[in-house]
Amino acid sequence: MRFETAVALRYLAASRRRAHVALIAAISIVGLAVGVAALIVSLALLSGFQDRIRRQMAERTAHLTVSPAKGTLLPDPETARRALESLPGVTAVVPILEGRGWISDVDGTAAYAVRFRNAAGAGNAEAPAPDDVRLARPLATRLHVDEGDLVRLTSSRTRLSPVGPIPVSAVLRVGAVRRSSALEKSAEVEVSEPVARTLTGVPAGAHSLEALLADPERAASAARDLSARLPAGHRVETWRERNAPLAFALRLEKVVIFVTVALVIVVAALNIVSNIALTVVEKKRDLGVFTSMGATPGALLRIYLTLGAVIGLVGTAAGVAIGVGIAAAADRFRLVPLPADVYMLSHVPFAIHPGEVAVIAAFAFATAVAAAILPARAASRLAPGEAIRLSR
Amino acid sequence: MSLAVRAENLSKTYTGEGAPVKVFSNLSFELPAGTFAAVMGPSGVGKSTLLHLIGGIDRPDEGRVEVFGEAIDELSPRERARFRNAKVGFVFQFHHLLPEFTAEENVAMPHRIAGVPEGAARRLAGELLARVGLADRRGHGARALSGGEQQRVAIARALARSPGLLLADEPTGNLDAAAAQTVFDLLRELHAERGMTTVLVTHNPELARRCDRLFTMTREGIAAAQGLSERG
């Protein structure tokens, strides 16, 4: 063990005899531990919810989407389809047709504006039957319909008739009512591909192509490959890019929570400053003695930096143990229940990400060491002769 | 005979809180190697300051200090630290042992600062403690030792790195007559054994007379040019 480390550890161990220093050291360590634990629990709580949102994102959004760079229809859907299917890891490719319109019950008593699309898109387990429609629960409730009832879906597109242009519409059976997703931007109804073609007036081709990947995390590299294989006039987007605003909001939320709760650690670090400053003052004579024995100013600096590092290490380790323990127990034993019918979750989920724990631990430790720099520098700049002379 | 210490035209003023305090100016001092010298003088004339300047833990405002031919004022802080560790041993009036450490750890500290591994440093410290008659007190903390024992540990610590120059600042000033005699005798014995140069600041004329040389430091006015006179 280096001389500086041995001295720092002995100072810390012997601080029990100096009640005021021991108290401040204990407050520093407890403060740091509380800050680290609070940060870990807060981020685990946030990660628990965010992971679910991301999973929904990956499930409900196609992993790769090829759309036209200009206009509404793909310029060369067959080439694009072949290019997609030739990519390694692609498990499904589906042409997508989408449009806007109104949905109403068959009596036409209430109508709501909706977006419709063929539901064989990526993320859906299976396409609806040819004359079926799949509705979200809130929309079904507003229409007062349930599975088996009939609805009328009217497209914004018109066709010419002997009496003039009339809207294109289809009467469809409610095949399934699904839970609505928090990620839906507006009411969406899902229909079969033939119905979608009829409503949109696109007998061949597609507005876009959607693909599912075996590993959604490989979407970015697959998109790069695909862009190189596609002719001009096509645009490729990954599921992350399509959900970029939401992903940014989630990241921002985490950063804000980190910065806010990290203030606890900063406050704890101020205690470390006062603890080490007090030790420097009390050990002023020792500094002179160490200097007389040949200790360099750098060695004196390292003694007090080590003191800060040891306090930081103990506080951080305790905080990590407490924080991870609380978050793991809260998730494992479902300690925070939620009304399932409101939140679609029976309990508050906690997800511990080792990377985040490592960042928190590194931040807390670095803050503790940084807090020691100021008093440690003061110690290293102390005039040794004066320290000895004044401590007689 | 070669010189252990050559100090030329030293001036030192302390500028802390309040008005600056001039300790001495134009002080010159030479000491042949191997001498056991005593420095006497009234309080406040700068005896301790002189030791600090010679030992390289403080710098003069003006003048030059050479120890064993090395101009220590020209050394970098790191080189001065190495110089102190290797060539100078300090003994202070109030022993200044580190209270968190045992006698053995205190004596081992200069070795540890020099980078000697802990085991070897403790072994060397144990040998030195045995030499000063404290082999059975090696595991005791500084507070568990008597005043005389504390000062003997401090002497052992000062000699840990076998320095060529021992600077003792009133090492017997805080001890009763018997303990002072023991400590002084020990210093003399070790000085002879190790062939060191020793500078002893003391207020005890009887001990001073038993040294090879006696220097008397006085304050001749505020700007005394020759505050030190040498007796053979």
Image (cartoon, helix red, strand yellow):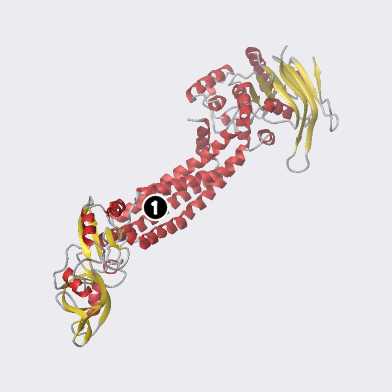
Quarter of the rendering occupied by the C terminus of chain B: top right
Residue B175: in sight, yes or no? no
- Report which quarter residue B216 is drawn in: top right
Residue type at mark 1: give it: Ile
Q: Is residue A205 left or right of residue B224?
A: left
- Report which quarter residue A45 is drawn in: bottom left
In this view, the residue in front, B201 or A234, is A234
Q: Position of residue A187 (x, y in %)?
A: 28, 73
Q: Which residue lies under the disc numbered 1? A: A40
Residue at the outermost right position: B221
Q: Is residue A130 left or right of residue B84?
A: left
Q: How many marks?
A: 1
* In the rendered image, the vertical position of residue B66 relative to residue A378, given as above or below: above
Residue at (17, 66) in percent of width and height: A127
Disc 1: CA contacts within 10 A as few (<14), some (14-19) or many (>=20): many
Q: Position of residue B157 (x, y in %)?
A: 59, 24
Residue at the outermost bottom position: A163
In this view, the residue in front, A252 or A15, is A252
In this view, the residue in front, A176 or A16, is A176
* In the rendered image, the vertical position of residue B37 relative to residue A114, given as above or below: above
- Check the residue under mark 1 and report the chain it is in: A
Residue at (72, 24) in percent of width and height: B65
Residue A94: in sight, yes or no? yes
